[in-house]
Image (cartoon, helix red, strand yellow):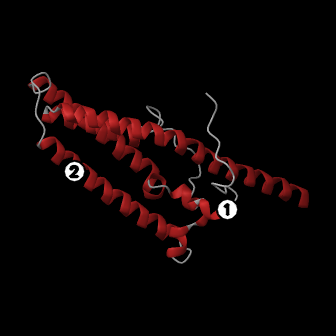
Amino acid sequence: MAPIAFPAALVDFDQKTLYKYRNKVLTRLFNGKSQAACYFLAATIFSLGIVRDLLYERALRHQPSHPLIDTTEATFAGYALLAMGNVLVISSTWQLGITGTFLGDYFGILMDHMVTGFPFNVTSAPMYYGSTLSFLGSALVYGKPAGLLLTVWVYLVYVVALRYENPFTAGIYAKRDADRATAAKEGKKQR
């Protein structure tokens, strides 16, 4: 099957206003202070995450349990998954800091080096996989099949997000590295 192409009459991909990243809307709202804009986004994402978790818990509370996953063993497995998920999420936040965790690279706040220690030596996306493990753990603790279904949905959303996020982030860092290499070459020429 051939890829779908949008006719130029329908979408003008040359218009810079189409790309919100390039517009730096949040940074402009914070008078050019990218750090403040990033912290605002971090607080927003964190708050929405709490709301998401509360809605998930509420949804599970009103769902039927199933005897195959409403057992002592499943409950213990659920708590173990919750612990593993939280370790991945908390340790990755510790390693990256607030701006590294909450899209600081979109604001031009880049880390000096790629983090390769724990939990990034276990998985390339510890926030996403840790969160998925936490959803799965909660489903088992509550013994709710609906939680398993929602966990699959969360996992699929994260997989799609990673397909866009990883190349985008890699591009940001590749551009930074290319700019540094160019600056280094120019510095050598001037000597």
* Pointer 1 local density, CA inside 10 Å: few below 14, some 14–19, many at least 20: few
Judge whether residue 83 can be spotted in this image.
no
> Which SS class for mark 1?
loop
Residue that appears at 13% across and 36% down: 142
Q: Position of residue 82 (x, y in %)?
A: 24, 37
- In the depicted view, which residue is nearer to us: 104 or 93? 104
> Which SS class for mark 2?
helix
Residue 190 is left or right of residue 8, and the answer is right
Q: Which residue is mark 2?
A: 55
Amino acid beneath label 2: Leu
- In the depicted view, which residue is nearer to us: 68 or 95? 68
Q: How far apart in space, not on screen, are marks 2 and 1 (Cα)?
A: 38 Å
Residue that appears at 47% across and 64% down: 38
Depicted 30 relative to depicted 60: above or below: below
Q: Position of residue 88 (x, y in %)?
A: 36, 39
Q: Position of residue 144 (x, y in %)?
A: 16, 33
- In the depicted view, which residue is nearer to us: 4 or 112? 4
| Closer mark to the observer between disc 2 and disc 1 | 1
Amino acid beneath label 1: Gln
Quadrant containing the N terminus is top right
- In the depicted view, which residue is nearer to us: 19 or 133? 19
Q: Which mark is residue 15?
A: 1
Q: Which mark is residue 124?
A: none
Residue 91 is left or right of residue 161, and the answer is left
Outermost residue, bottom side:
31
